[in-house]
Image: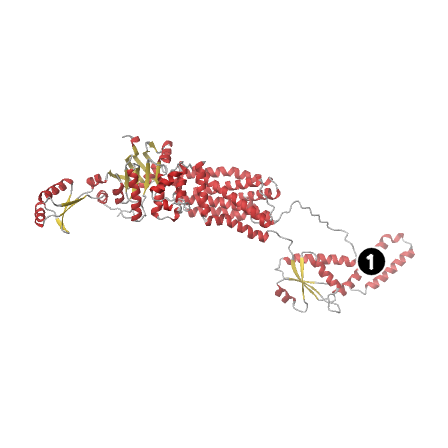
Amino acid sequence: MGKEGHAVVTEGLVKVYGNSVRALDGVSIEVRRGEVFALLGPNGAGKTTLVEILLTLRKPTSGRAYVLGEDVLGGRGRSVVRKRVGAILQESESFDLLTVRETLRLYGRLYGADARRAEELMELLDLREHADRPYGKLSGGLRRRVLLAAALINDPELVFLDEPTTGLDPGSRRDVWSVLKRMRREGVTVFLTTHYMEEAEALADRVGIIVNGKMVAIGSPGELAEKYGGSKTIRVSGIRPEVAERLQRELGGARIENGELVWVASNQTEVNRIVQAVITASPEAVFSVRNPGLEEVFLRLTGRRITEEGGIA
Amino acid sequence: MRRSLAFSSAVAREWMRSKTSVFWSVAFPLILLLVFGAAFGDIRVQTYPLLVVNEDLDYSGRPTGLSTALVNAINSTGIVEVRLAESGHSIEDVMRERGIYRALVIRRGFEEELLRASVAGRVDVLVSTLEYIVATYGNRTPPEDRSRIESGISALKTLRSNFSSDAVKVIYVRDPNDQPSSAVEGVIRSVLQAFNLRLLGANETLSLSTSDLAFRRTRPIDLYLPGVLTAFVMTNGVLGTSSALAEMRRSRLLRRLAITPLRLSELLTGLVLVQVLMTSVLSALLVAVGWAVFRSSFSLGPVAVALILVDSLLFSSLGLLIGSALKEVEAVNAASSVVVFPMMFLSGAFWPLEFAPPFMRTIASLTPLYYFVEGLRAAGVYGDLGPSLTAFSIGLAAFPVLLLAGSRLLERELAE
């Protein structure tokens, strides 16, 4: 698939601030049309720099970047970004004293959109009852929903969401997720940056992990878990005690936790072997296999964890 | 243009709903106009109170005719307002008690001494006149006539020796720290001079004739109003635009708008349009209040309106440049204040520079606001377009340069 077939393509993108701060160090990614792509990384990893280059707000030191098939360094690229792309920038806000309706109508007028589009989006994002409240008086979650509505006002083909849920309480975060899931169902391409593992896992079709300006892994959450996640946990319940004792003896490595047999398998082959043996011994057994999450993937790739605040521990 | 109007409409709404912005941009200039207008709006001729202690009483205890005439003459100048004080108390105590730090004391025997002195004076004049005639025309006068005149002079000199030639004194008591006391002293001296002439029966041979030629009734409020208007158009332009830009940068709204179809030129035009709108509202309100409350004769003719618009354009552009050059809200506000407030007070917007020391006038002439103040006063009060030409030249030359420089800086910031 060429550049035209992708929503976003970057090739060896480098951005150096001043003489020494290397925010991006040869980043190459491809984001397919219609997918939700999550760029996962701690604070300072280069996520916002990458998004701002793609939105033509920054110039790369070297490398190329294409959005909807157009080079972002060219005039056409700027024009494409301004007309066919939507965005929520990190920590961005709007006019405090304009109401929700006025805010959306302002963005609508900037894009030449029909006034009905603002009403539609308020309906879609459950903002109708807040339509006449000033933006500055809304809760953090509602503000993000307004910004999301503003990002969608031009019916964009691609939406950039830079840390859209940072600083929100869990309830507000889930509200935003439900809107993003709806967008995914409608086929909008979403380029999301986040430092929340569960957000990337819950929303993304594919995840790119970025650390210190370098892409360290790209793939679907399953692929990443498979490739970098390490061990899987198999829990078995609903079998007779003597069968459990026999399986423990024959397969080895099992422990009993809260009446369940628990194995830790290092790969899928081992998982298959254990599952096969248990089914043979006790067809009525109940299984659960927990794949490693992105947290384990990140830990194995970097040897560190991302904290709730986005730092590295 | 459609996008620019949409943006300026949003900025204008935001501004109108901010009580702080409306207070400082509109209410505060109006309050200032009302307060200063009430204080200096209609200055009449200043009168100064003068305590008069008249000790020269007749046998019935009433002030003598001549002392009363002197007091009335001083009071009728229109500059000094006589406040009579009873005699018999310490003059110092009376001055302190009544808070008037200048007093005239007319001593007992004033009238009598004055009459005597006036007779002596008149005889002196007569003798002097006769001696002049004898000295000048004596050779042509028959000897018997000349002898009669000389004996007459001799009789007059004998009569004159019965009258004292000492000047009658009234006492002026004053506090040297009291500034108006010198002016009051001058008034009293003039009155005494006129009194002397009258007592001698002499006419003024040299007099000053005053001719009033009122081209137009200009009062302080007429000059103050355009000063306030120009100054606040300037402060609103610089502070309003720079802080709006700084706030949009802080909330990252500037970057958000930069990725919409709104062009940078449209964004800047929108910000300037809002200033022009606010300037129009402020100008109309100030002029309306000036006329309604103080009957100011300042008028908003086409040249005055154009000058106000150029004033707004110039200083909004300066605000854009400051807002573009500095990144932090605090730095932008501090820099704008450093530019605005000294210029406001040094330009002569609030007081006439005629009374300022020369170095202040030199400093004022270095501020662009000075030319707008002078231009608007000349155009709106005297209908004189000359001074506004300098302001137009400065404004129209500097405005595009500032706007371009600000826009270049922003452009660079939004595509680092």
Kind of residue indicated by mark 1: Leu
Q: Secondary structure at mark 1?
A: helix
User: Where is residue B204 shown, x and y percent of the image?
Assistant: 76, 53
Dot 1 crowding, Cα within 10 Å, few <14, some 14–19, many 20+: some
Residue A140 visible in this rendered orientation of the protein: yes
Position of A309 with respect to B265 (left or right) is: left
Residue A10 occupies which quadrant of the picture? top left
For this rendering, which residue is in front, B192 or A66? Answer: A66
Say which chain tag 1 marks.
B
- Say which residue label 1 marks: B126
User: Where is residue B135 shown, x and y percent of the image?
Assistant: 85, 54
For this rendering, which residue is in front, B309 or B122? Answer: B309
For this rendering, which residue is in front, A72 or A293? Answer: A293
Position of A209 with respect to A90 (left or right) is: left
Examine the rendered structure and indicate whether residue A260 appears above or below residue B389. below
Residue B352 visible in this rendered orientation of the protein: no
